Amino acid sequence: MPTLLTTGPLLDPKNDFVFKKLFTEAPTPLAALINAVRCDDPPIEVVEVQIS
């Protein structure tokens, strides 16, 4: 059975800082998450990400 190697404790994705850091550096997973939640609506696309 493969083992999972970690270098330290995982960060809590419910923390605003972690969420913002994760999804502003890679906006495509955020669009996929939003599209998965709003499955009956037309999909959204990432055009531009602004950090204010």
Image (cartoon, grey):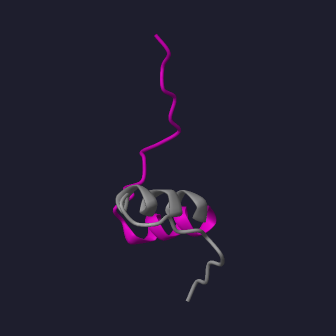
Q: Position of residue 1 (x, y in %)?
A: 46, 10
Residue 13 is one of the magenta-drawn residues: yes
Look at 50% across and 57% down and name the residue there: 32
Q: Position of residue 2 (x, y in %)?
A: 50, 15
The magenta segment is 1-26
Instruction: Describe residue 17's horizontal placement relative to residue 52 as left or right.
Output: left
Above or below for 11 versus 51: above
| Residue at the extreme right | 48
Report the number of discs.
0
Q: Quadrant of the C terminus?
A: bottom right
Instruction: Describe residue 25's horizontal placement relative to residue 16 as left or right.
Output: right
The front one of 20 and 4 is 20
Residue 22 is one of the magenta-drawn residues: yes
| Residue at the extreme bottom | 52
Look at 52% across and 29% down and name the residue there: 5
Q: Position of residue 16 (x, y in %)?
A: 39, 71
The front one of 17 and 31 is 31
Q: Main secondary structure of the magenta part?
A: loop
Look at 48% across and 26% down and name the residue there: 4
Q: Position of residue 51 (x, y in %)?
A: 58, 83
The front one of 48 and 22 is 48
The front one of 47 and 43 is 43
| Rendered image quadrant of residue 49 | bottom right
Above or below for 49 versus 21: below
| Rendered image quadrant of residue 29 | bottom right
